[in-house]
Amino acid sequence: DGGITQSPKYLFRKEGQNVTLSCEQNLNHDAMYWYRQDPGQGLRLIYYSQIVNDFQKGDIAEGYSVSREKKESFPLTVTSAQKNPTAFYLCASSRTSGIQETQYFGPGTRLLVL
Amino acid sequence: QKEVEQDPGPLSVPEGAIVSLNCTYSNSAFQYFMWYRQYSRKGPELLMYTYSSGNKEDGRFTAQVDKSSKYISLFIRDSQPSDSATYLCAMSAWKGAQKLVFGQGTRLTINP
């Protein structure tokens, strides 16, 4: 089955710790995205990448970092600089050409601070 | 003012009712409109996709776009308890999916 996988499902972070969220897709999509979802605030874009080895900041990139070394993978690191990391993190992917393109989402990772 | 406004609800209706979910937007360049359904603690899944103005029907779901009023709607007929979820509208000015702008989401509960 083609799709997007995110791991872990739940992640706990201690003060001052960096944590990495995994996102893998086998849809052969060029573009990948990371969103943060807080209650009542919809989805806010953290970073996106349209091609391997290239990525751009979204609306709330501060305190986060990403890499795109492979087409299939787009890991997100939540650094200690992110002071309020508790949220639901969603990874998405899409093609970059064609008609009626849209984003497909993974199941999400819930990050909690200890 | 947010580019896309969506009433967060919550909205609670009895089973079998017709549900109307709405979004307004301010950017007249938007021409691609989507509705996503998100069950609790899951990722959003695409429900409807429409281009420009008009209606699109898929089973019990109808998406409506009125670009002159900058207003989109999702109608659910014969609502079922399994329709209970958060519904997110999303829109883009570009044919590609890279620049989606999302509404806040409306939390819907269908009561048996």
Image (cartoon, coloured by chain):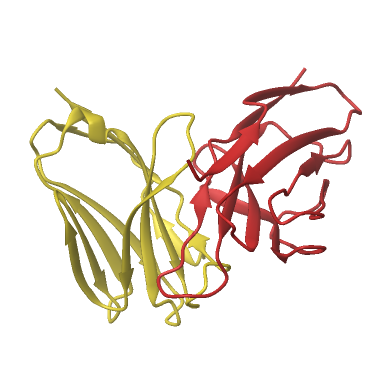
Chain colours: A red, B yellow
Q: Quadrant of residue A96?
A: bottom right
Quarter that holds the C terminus of chain B: top left
Residue farthest front in this picture = A1
Nearest the camera: A58 or B3?
A58
Task: Tell me the quarter of the picture where residue A28 sits.
Answer: bottom right
Name the residue located 63 percent from the left edge and 62 percent from the top edge: A31
Depth check: give the residue in front, B65 or A22.
Answer: A22
- The residue positioned farthest toward the right in the image shown: A16
Question: Is any atom of residue A97 visible in this view?
Answer: yes
Tell me residue B21's x, y (percent): 26, 52
Residue B56 locus on image (x, y percent)? 20, 66
Residue sitting at 82 percent across and 63 percent down?
A53
Residue B107 in which image quadrant: top left
Total number of numbered labels?
Answer: 0
| Depicted B48 relative to depicted A81: above or below | below
Please tell me which residue lies in front, B55 or A81. B55
Q: Looking at the image, which residue is at 77% across and 17% down?
A: A114
Of B91 and A82, nearer the camera is B91
Residue at 11 percent across and 30 percent down: it is B15
Percent across and percent down for residue B29 are: 45, 82
Q: Is B108 rendered above or below residue B57?
A: above
Q: Is residue A25 left or right of residue A80?
A: left
A7 displayed left or right of B84: right
Confirm whether residue A88 shows in the render.
no
- In the rendered image, the vertical position of residue A110 relative to residue B28, given as above or below: above
Q: Position of residue B105 (x, y in %)?
A: 41, 47
